[in-house]
Image (cartoon, helix red, strand yellow):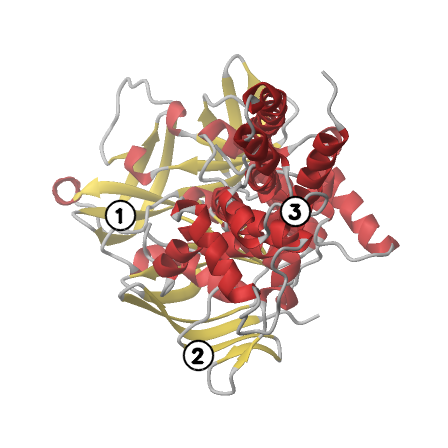
Amino acid sequence: MSLSAAEMEALAISIRVALLSTAIVAIPGVFLGWILAIPRWRGRALVDALVMLPLVLPPVVVGWALLMLLGGRSPFGIDIAFTGLAAAVAGGVVGLPLLIRASRIGFESVDSRLEEAARTLGMKRLEAFFKISLPLAAPAIGQGLILCMARSMGEFGATITFAGAIPGSTRTLPLMIHEQLQAPGGDQLAMRLVIFSALISLAAMATSEWLARKVRSRKGGLR
Amino acid sequence: MNSTLSFDLELHRGDRSIIAAATLDAPSTGLLGPSGSGKTTLLHAIAGLISPSRGRIQIADEVLFDSKTGIDVPPEKRRIALVFQDGRLFPHWSVKRNIMVGTAAGSEATNLADEVIQLLELSPLLSRMPDTLSGGEMQRVALARALAMKPRWLLLDEPLSALDTRLKKRILPFLIRVRDYFKIPILHVSHDVGELISVSDTLLHLTGNRLTGPSSYQDLLLQNSSGEIEAMNMLTATVETNQQGEVLLRCGEMELVSTAKLDPQCRSATVRIAPSEIALSTGSLGDISIRNRIEGKVTKVHPWGRSCLVEIDAKERILAECTVESCRELGLEEGRMVTILIKASAVHLYLNG
């Protein structure tokens, strides 16, 4: 089952886009997860709802919003529409809620009193975060990163709206499958890519599940 | 080095407030109080984890908190170690790394850590992860971690409360060792009077949102006639013989028999007898199974909740609890001669140091 040059190219673009989009949202995603794990502050519910929007909005709406914000009529004067970067941003934005949710659960499972203990032992607040809370939340964050990457790899609606399906630049696997399905008799052709996509997704879910198990086995304190 | 800890502060927790002022310069001070009285809150304020709403905290001349001048030294700069009730070891680090977390660089700090590890007998545990430790081991590691940072004060927040009696008896000597060897002043919180007075000579009492003391246990006990503080006789004893399930002890000029289990190697112990387990007699006894019969003279009778606490001079000072009625029937008053009766099974033994 060998892939044609164009299919290989789509696969390579998909991987590149997924990695880049995860890299773009990694820090803001973990940061937002950490913020949302802090109990009881004003506006938490609103922020929570806002960051979850890309998960429930139709991707095509997300794509349109990105086009408005970062396209030709961008209020910030940044126009990246229909570039490889646009595909990464589109994938990142739809994957972000998954990363935030997982990180948040990770930070919530860390006993915040461990940071107190760290402070009395001479660690500054930031040092306690990086040495205690972050490593303890790391498996959950890793799980979030994988889910985010898998989600952005499968992104279709936002990508086609904001980045198009330019061969060699923004035509990822799902866009290629869509294209193949449009051609007469293309479903035979598309089947191979569909299997490919399914395998990649399964591998991602398996890795994520493995990390989840690690989270559960890592507990502290007297119990 | 002067390390007198003094504070005068007002703390708010939820809708309650605590007013506490004291100057502590004893090698070890106990903080006694019913649960929910704010003992932990007070320790957290001293360690810098929460800020008082008003007041001042200082060690010698160094101000750690002052609401007037706005000084609030962060916990990491106070060098006050806090051992938590639940250990709070860092679960992703080995025992060794947990112990070393607060140590400074340099050979002096490493030597201190080695001493701590030896004293608390932790060498065999160093490479273990916290989730493989027993409760008693965890608390020993938590104690070592606190000591290795070379703190100016050691705050213990019910460090033994999560442990059962058998383990408590095994950890207590380590606390006494720490107190005598490192000479770091200790503020020790507990609701267990016996645990506190094994380690501390002076006590604070936090109740009804107010702090009293520091004063000696006896004074605190007898001033507080509500019976809220648990009464306890504590004596230091040397072991004379230890065989056939009976330990013969000498406390000054007084002899006691105990059926408690004691390591045959052990030459000295702390004796604990609850006043409620002591009976008094003023007449002839005849045949009686009680092994400890000690002559003494009543020095004072204190009202004690719904009963009386009778203070007796029997070479050592002994407190016995009697109902008001038996006090009247026996005519217990100052100067009256009595026989103190203690079953051998009521004489509880704790190891020293």
**What kind of element bears circle 2?**
strand
- Residue at horizontal 74%, vertical 19%? A2
Disc marking residue A166? 3
| Residue B190 vs residue A98, the one in the foreground | A98
> Outermost residue toward the top?
B244
Mark nearer the viewer, 1 or 3: 3
Task: Name the mark nearer the viewer: 2 or 1.
Answer: 2
Report the front residue among B308 and A45. A45
Q: Position of residue A82 (x, y in %)?
A: 62, 55
Q: Is residue B129 above or below residue B142?
A: above
Q: Classify mark 1: helix, strand or loop.
A: strand
Q: Quadrant of residue A211?
A: top right
Compared to residue B12, the image places residue B31 above or below, namely above
Asked whether, in this view, residue A13 is left or right of residue B21, the answer is right
Residue A61 visible somewhere in the drawing: yes
Residue at mark 2 to residue at mark 1: CA–CA distance: 38 Å
Q: Residue at x 53, y 41 (%)?
A: A156
Q: Which mark is residue B55?
A: 2
Estimate how packed mark 2 is, as few (under 14), some (14 to 19) or many (20 or more) residues with alpha carbons within 10 Å: some
Q: Chain of mark 1?
A: B
- Single out the residue that lies furthest toward the front: A184
Q: What residue is shown with label 1? A: B309
Q: Quadrant of residue B129?
A: top right
**x and y percentages locating residue B174 in the rendered image:** 62, 40
Same subunit, labels 2 and 3: the answer reads no
